[in-house]
Amino acid sequence: MVKNEMKLQLPSRSCNESFARIAISSFFAQLDPTVDEIADIKTAVSEAVTNSIVHGYENSIGNIYIHAKILDDNKIYIKIRDKGCGIEDVEKAKEPMYTTCKTGERSGLGFTVMQSFMDKLKVNSKKGKGTTVVLTKTLRKRL
Amino acid sequence: MQKTDVKIKLEGSTMVAYLSGEIDHHCAASLRSFLDVKIQTGHPKLLILDFANISFMDSSGIGLVMGRYKLMKCIGGTLKIKNPSNQIRKVMTLAGFDKLSIVEKMKPIKRRRSEYIGKK
């Protein structure tokens, strides 16, 4: 059951990276997460949004759609979607240190960070259609 | 928004870059060119990146550190990282920085909750 939710739509400008991670982590603040949990969420969201900006809409500006939900048992759900160029080989893209970026200094760790900082990562992508990243995590129950 | 900033201190052949704010893809490029100019003009033997006042870093920071690590190697110097927070340390461990032994071993810095929530 969805206990609470929010939707956010932003253009893929890099100045929105910080806004996106702050907005999402602030939304989940109602669950009274630990400092480490908030840091994990912020980092994972930052990685997904940066991917949409750097790779999804490489040389253009498009919209990024974020849907955050609070589910039962302190489970959080974050969907980050773009309508950019899509990923040809998702499994390859998930490999640590793999990057298609030749000019900048991208570490190729985006998906690795998302995977290790959240409980689950799901990536759906279609070449030319866009990419959807779903992140879920169960936050520790506070007394 | 907490602005990303760097203060450089050069003592002999050691250059310390006191970073502050947040490191993401948005600010990595300007930080990179600023540091590169300082390295190329100062020619330090040791470059210390002090993360004490960095409240957030994602994998864009890994690219930034790796690039400076390579540049320092190129000019015959070394790079060290000082005072990373728990979160930054976690990201750095994923990148294998612990194996490069460039991260100074120190007790993690305790940060207040308000530094994470509501601020940039």
Image: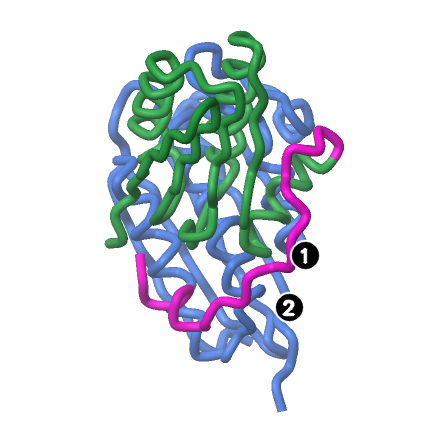
The chain identifier of the residue carrying mark 2 reads A
Question: What is the chief secondary structure element of the magenta stretch?
Answer: loop
Residue placed under numbered mark 1 in the picture? A119
The reply to whether residue B12 is in sight is yes
Question: Which x, y percent locates residue A21?
Answer: 39, 54
Q: Is residue B4 above or below residue A141?
A: above
Element at badge 2? strand
Question: Which x, y percent locates residue B68?
Answer: 49, 21
The reply, left or right, for residue B21 in relation to residue B110 is: left
Sequence order check, earlier mark of 1 and 2:
1
The blue chain is A
Q: Residue furthest bottom?
A: A143
Residue at 62 percent of width and 62 percent of height: A137
Question: Which x, y percent locates residue A9?
Answer: 28, 50
Residue placed under numbered mark 2 in the picture? A138
Q: Mark 1 touching mark 2, by CB under 8 A? A: yes
